[in-house]
Amino acid sequence: MIDVNILRKNPEILFDSQKRRFQSDEIIKEAIRLDSEWRELLRKSNNLKADKNKLVREIGEIIRAGGNSDSIKSKASEIDRNIGDYETKLREIESERDLILKKIPNIVDPEAPVAKDDSGNLPIYFEGRAKVFESDVEGFVAQSMGKMEYEISRFKPQSHVDLLVKRNLANLESAAMVSGSRFYYLLGSLVLLETSLEHFALEFMQKKGFTLVEPPFMLNKQATDGATDFTAFEDTLYKIEGEDLYLIATSEHPIAAFHYDTILEENQLPLLYAGISPCFRKEAGAHGKDTKGIFRVHQFNKIEQFAFVKPEDSKSYHQKLLENAKEFYRALGIPFRIVDIATGDLGNVASRKFDIEAWYPAQAQFREVVSASNVMDYQARRLKVRYRGKDGNAYVHTLNSTLAAMTRTLVAIIENNQLEDGSIVVPKVLRELMGKEVI
RNA sequence: GCGGGGAUAGCCGAGCGGUAAGGCGACGGCCUGCUAAGCCGUUUCCCUAUGGGAUCGGGGGUUCGAUUCCCCCUCCCCGCGCCA
């Protein structure tokens, strides 16, 4: 949620932000209208309450002195009825205002590239040595802007789907039968590769000073709505029938809600967490996209970075989270590029976002594996997470970043490390945990 | 799931129909060679703000007035039951 004081005192900031997002400013105008109506009603209602409180105190004194207070009592009752009318109207306008206030997108960072959609996302960094099949070279050079090393693959890389099914490391047909499309059974050594990857990732984060956390995998509506915009997110969430519970789409949400309605001490900050959890997503509206394999699925495990920091530190922690993710993919030996996400593609919550996109040789494409967002105070205001600063209480800033989403990272390892015979080389850093060098 | 006991400010904790004691911590100030002690103030949210309103787990009710009485819900503690 944005700061309502900006709406009152500097609405031009919001109009400007909406323009840079290529979004309508109707929502800002509507919010201003509802807010001023609300304040007018509140003023009237508070004045009546002041009158009534005065009378009630008088009644107390009369009764203590042993006098008769009947006439003044009826006067108080009459004011009470009046207050009731105003309160009803006030609550109506208030909920209308709050609903729209929560829908106003976060203010975009002035440094984010301005464009109306993802075609304006800006590749800004390249690392690693990619394996590219000869017919894909042209596309690779374009996507890497000629700034990335590569070597020609001597064979046509197989897609992870073919590879996994042939090697019996996954069964997608059975999963489709018992659960539906976009589910999977992982089998054999691939399971060990996943758990090794998780273990490595958790150890990595702990060494970086992050507190490891396994959060609840379900949240109630209130917490979900605090962590994200519920009305916008509802379609992606699985609801538990007959309960006020939703399966989480990412551990970002339960971790964000961890300090719900809390005033932290300044010396507690920064609070750094690394979450591990399964993520459940309906992927509605993704029909036809990545339908094969385990790249886009309804359920996957993910290690997530999350930070609560002082406002002045959020920019530098945004870089730190991104740096951690870079170091992680470097350690795994996966070639990648970093993309600065355009204003029109940010989503409502982020003020600035960087994605890490790994190179997938079989798809001959860079695809998202990490998304690192600076949310500023947008989430903290919804969740009422504050800290006691020198000049009074202030909202903290929150940041989140993937470290590794298992399915996508596994696919990246499989596609990049495959040999001509379909075996998969285990990344060096996982060999000791795995107990083998090749699957 | 059943029975009993609870939830009060950042934390602890009194009040149990007349409008939130006290303590601790934190912050600011005074005092002081320094530190400590002591003293004063601040310490939740909202409002067009030397003022006013709201707030005692949440929601409803009774009353001129509810932290206090009644109803519903949530969570925590103790016992019993069930259980991977």
Image (tube, coloured by chain):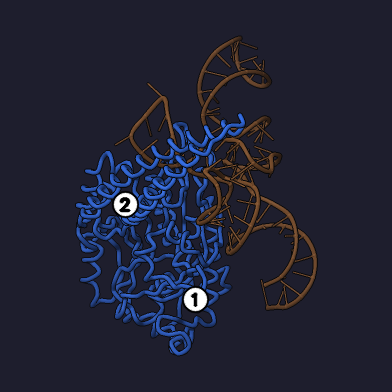
Q: Give the image location of residue A180, x and y in percent.
A: 42, 85
Q: Quadrant of residue B16?
A: top right
Mark-to-mark CA distance, 1 and 2: 32 Å
Q: Give the image location of residue A52, x and y in percent.
A: 45, 38
Residue type marked 1:
Glu
The residue located at (36%, 64%) in the rendering is A231
Vertical arrangement, residue A163 with respect to residue A299, above or below: below
Q: Colour of chain B?
A: brown
Q: Which SS class for mark 1? A: loop
- The mark lying in front, picked from 1 and 2, is 1
Chain of the residue on which disc 2 is drawn: A
Which comes before the other along the chain, label 1 or label 2? 2
Chain of the residue on which disc 1 is drawn: A
Q: Is residue A281 visible?
A: yes
Q: Is residue A116 found left or right of A312 in the rendered image?
A: left
Residue, disc 2: A106
Residue type marked 2:
Asn
What chain is the blue one?
Answer: A
Q: Is residue A95 found left or right of A222 in the rendered image?
A: left
Q: Which SS class for mark 2? A: loop
Residue A77 badge: none
Q: Is residue A304 found left or right of A352 in the rendered image?
A: right
Q: Quadrant of residue B10?
A: top right
Q: Give the image location of residue A158, x and y in percent.
A: 35, 82
